[in-house]
Image (cartoon, helix red, strand yellow):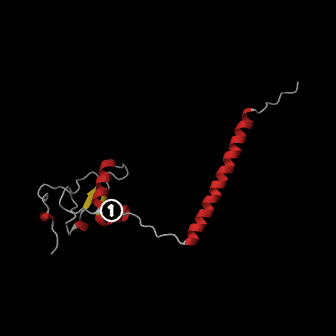
Amino acid sequence: MTNSPNKCSKFDSCDSPWCPLDVGLGKRVWYVGEEICKSQTVDKPWWVRKQRSLNRRRPPSLVGRAFTHAEFIRVFSPTIHKPLTEEQRQTRRAQMNQINLARRINSKVGDASTVSCSTKQVPQSIG
């Protein structure tokens, strides 16, 4: 048995082009600023929360852009990172240690240069 949008209590008053229960979801487009699912009884997928967030923020680069469902999923899906191997962890630790050391050295040099700049003598002209 498949779900259909008319099983939703908000079906008659809903203006959302994307319904989580709609089997034809891939045929429709959604624009930032358009209605989103308002049902309280349907288990909403992650992309409904993302739509709500985009509607709140309305990024200028996305306003007026049409998204197919597949494109929306591809662009906004959460990224899952693979865990690092022990060798990769050690390499990154060594890189971070070098960066931190360089920062400490630069901050000490920076402190000394600010002191020397403030006591710098101006050469007098030979007259």
Name the residue at 68% across, 48% down. 106
Q: Quadrant of residue 7?
A: bottom left
Q: What count of labels does the image hold?
A: 1
From the top left corner, tell me how far across and down residue 57 is, in percent: 34, 48
Residue nearer the viewer, 105 or 15: 105
Badge 1 density bin: few <14, some 14–19, many ≥20, Cα 10 Å? some
| Helix, strand or loop status at disc 1 | helix
From the top left corner, tell me how far across and down residue 39 is, in percent: 18, 57
Residue that carries the numbered disc 1 in the rendered image: 72
Above or below, 33 relative to 118 = below
Q: In which quarter of the image is residue 114?
A: top right
From the top left corner, tell me how far across and down residue 45 is, in percent: 27, 63
Residue flagged by tag 1: what amino acid is it? Phe
Q: Which residue lies furthest to the top in this view?
A: 127
Above or below, 105 relative to 47 = above
Name the residue at 19% across, 62% down. 42
Name the residue at 64% across, 51% down. 103
Above or below, 1 relative to 92 = below
From the top left corner, tell me how far across and down residue 27 is, in percent: 24, 67
Residue nearer the viewer, 31 or 90: 90
Decide if residue 88 is on the left or right side of residue 122. Answer: left
Q: In which quarter of the image is residue 110?
A: top right
Decide if residue 127 is on the left or right side of residue 22. Answer: right
Q: Which quadrant would the C terminus be assigned to in this image?
A: top right
Q: Which quadrant would the N terminus be assigned to in this image?
A: bottom left
